[in-house]
């Protein structure tokens, strides 16, 4: 009997142990998968689940979202974090309606051309929604491939072209099997081959893992620490956005001044929200979520 390939062993493990997530179920369509992939960027599954379900209940199709304002998308995003993703999803839904008749496209180049859809998201949708053969490489996949194949403890902070090549070489030739393997690599990195506490004893490729064979060396450089949140511009932006999100229209500047005592930091955070297309000024005295009402007057 032929020895199972790396992808075959991981895929078989995945079929037995994968978490039951709604966007993985057969009834989840391309739009639901696209929304999940955008929400899961830098956000844990536990936080994404309720937000994803609420989003799809309100906007089950790209056309439904495109018919709402970007302000409503920001409100619906709530405290999921990185709210620019909500605006990008709204822009993406408009483009899908205008360019593709409301259907999420299945060609990689068309997915890459959508607003806010990058290399990872486009390949993830092509693979998971349409069963195509593409290397889907996120932090988890890079860590699995780097450890198991190259014997290195850490894949670095960003995806490189070499990561795509290394992952694609592991994929089966048949598209459906490759799509399954892509999901399996990602799951293995998320729940077994984790960054801090890998569970090598239950890993389906432990016997051939190059990192395990070399004694599981630690990364050579300094350990990356989670970024602090308290007192940062991110916190101030979140507080300002919370006030604007709960309002039904423009919010006077004086109300926003009460959010944070440091005038310089508050002004910088507010300017950042405007620059990111999340908030727009109304005259010289008020602000609102972008698109929350009639077009803002043009400053003279």
Image: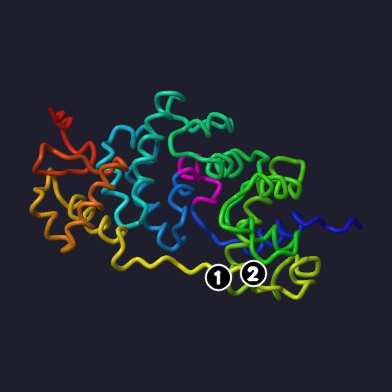
The answer to whether the residues at label 2 and label 1 have Cβ atoms under 8 Å apart is yes
Dividing the picture into quadrants, the one containing residue 141 is bottom right
Residue 239 in the magenta stretch? The answer is no
Q: Among all residues in the image, which is located at the extreme right?
A: 1
Which one is nearer the viewer's eye here, 220 or 37? Answer: 220
Taking the spot 44% from the left edge, 39% from the top edge, the residue there is: 116
Q: Is residue 300 above or below residue 280?
A: above
Element on which disc 1 rests: loop
Taking the spot 58% from the left edge, 63% from the top edge, the residue there is: 190
Q: Is residue 59 above or below residue 229?
A: above
Position of the C terminus, as image quadrant, is: top left
Q: Is residue 211 left or right of residue 69?
A: right
Q: Which residue is mark 1?
A: 223
Position of the N terminus, as image quadrant, is: bottom right
* Res 37 label: none
Taking the spot 77% from the left edge, 57% from the top edge, the residue there is: 6
Dividing the picture into quadrants, the one containing residue 13 is bottom right
Q: Percent x, y for residue 25?
A: 54, 50
Taking the spot 32% from the left edge, 43% from the top edge, the residue there is: 276
Element on which disc 2 rests: loop
Q: Percent x, y for residue 72?
A: 26, 43
Q: Residues within 10 Å of mark 2 (few under 14, many from 20)?
A: few
* Res 219 label: 2
Give the residues in magenta.
Answer: 23-34
Q: Is residue 189 above or below residue 182?
A: below
Q: Is residue 55 left or right of residue 33?
A: left
Give the tally of numbered discs.
Answer: 2
Dividing the picture into quadrants, the one containing residue 239 is bottom left
Q: Percent x, y for residue 298?
A: 16, 28
Residue 29 in the magenta stretch? The answer is yes
Q: Is residue 170 left or right of residue 68?
A: right
């Amino acid at each position: 009997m032929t020895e199972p390939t790396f992808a075959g062993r991981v895929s078989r493990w995945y079929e037995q142990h994968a978490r039951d997530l709604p966007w993985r179920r057969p009834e989840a369509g391309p739009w639901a998968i696209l929304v999940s992939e955008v929400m899961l960027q830098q956000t844990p599954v536990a936080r994404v689940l309720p937000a994803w379900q609420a989003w799809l209940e309100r906007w089950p199709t790209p056309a439904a979202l495109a018919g709402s304002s970007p302000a409503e998308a920001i409100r619906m995003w709530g405290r999921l974090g990185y709210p620019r993703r909500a605006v990008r999803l709204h822009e993406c839904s408009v483009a899908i309606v205008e360019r593709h008749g409301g259907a999420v496209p299945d060609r990689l180049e068309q997915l890459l051309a959508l607003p806010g859809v990058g290399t990872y998201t486009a390949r993830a949708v092509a693979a998971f929604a349409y069963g195509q053969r593409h290397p889907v490489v996120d932090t988890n996949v890079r860590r699995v491939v780097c450890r198991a194949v190259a014997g290195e403890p850490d894949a670095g902070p960003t995806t490189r072209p070499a990561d795509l090549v290394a992952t694609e070489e592991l994929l089966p030739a048949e598209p459906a099997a490759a799509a399954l393997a892509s999901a399996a690599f990602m799951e293995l990195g998320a729940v077994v081959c984790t960054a801090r506490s890998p569970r090598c004893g239950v890993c389906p490729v432990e016997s051939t893992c190059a990192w395990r064979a070399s004694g599981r060396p630690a990364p050579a450089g300094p350990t990356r620490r989670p970024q602090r949140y308290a007192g940062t511009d991110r916190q101030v932006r979140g507080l300002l956005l919370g006030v604007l999100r709960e309002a039904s229209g423009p919010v006077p500047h004086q109300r926003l001044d009460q959010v944070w005592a440091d005038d310089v930091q508050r002004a910088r955070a507010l300017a950042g929200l405007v620059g990111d297309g999340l908030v727009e000024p109304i005259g010289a005295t008020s602000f609102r979520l972008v698109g929350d009402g009639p077009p803002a007057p043009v400053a003279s």
